[in-house]
Amino acid sequence: MLMMLPFLIDQVQEVACPLFKAARNRFHSRIQLWDFVRGRFLGHLLPSWEVLWKSIIYGFKPEVIQLDTS
């Protein structure tokens, strides 16, 4: 059942989220989109999904937040 949850979330976003639709339209395939999303998650600390989708749609790179380890 848990394996179906990401698929369900993807389907709901595809139908209901205009930001997701706009980000999806910037790529030729879903594989390209999800590779890009994975890269954003690995390289940036994003405060919300909205920031993620807008960074893809408008092409800006959110700043990497450096954590203070002292």
Image (spheres, rainbow, N blue to C red):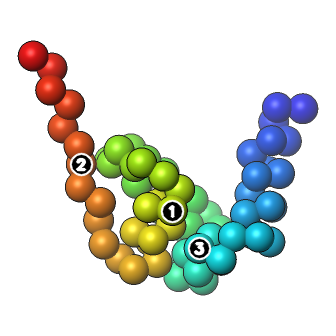
Q: Which mark is residue 64?
A: 2
Q: Are marks 2 and 1 in contact (CB under 8 Å)?
A: no
Specify the farthest residue to the left: 70
28 vs 11, left or right, is left
Label 2 Cα crowd, 10 Å radius (few <14 / some 14-19 / many 20+): few
Secondary structure at numbered mark 1 = helix
Residue 42 higher or lower than 23, as above or below: above
What residue is shown with label 3? Answer: 19
Q: CA distance from mark 3 to mark 1?
A: 7 Å
Q: CA distance from mark 2 to mark 3?
A: 22 Å
Secondary structure at numbered mark 3 = helix
Residue 3 higher or lower than 48, as above or below: above
The structure residue drawn at horizontal position 76% and vertical position 52%, both measured from the top left corner, is: 9
Q: Give the mark nearer the N terminus: 2 vs 3.
A: 3
Q: Give the mark nearer the N terminus: 2 vs 1.
A: 1
- Image spot of residue 62 (x, y percent): 29, 60
- Residue depth check, mark 2 versus mark 1: number of the one nearer the observer: 1
- Image spot of residue 55 (x, y percent): 40, 69
Q: Are marks 3 and 1 in contact (CB under 8 Å)?
A: yes
The kind of residue on which mark 3 rests is Leu
The kind of residue on which mark 1 rests is Glu
Secondary structure at numbered mark 2 = loop
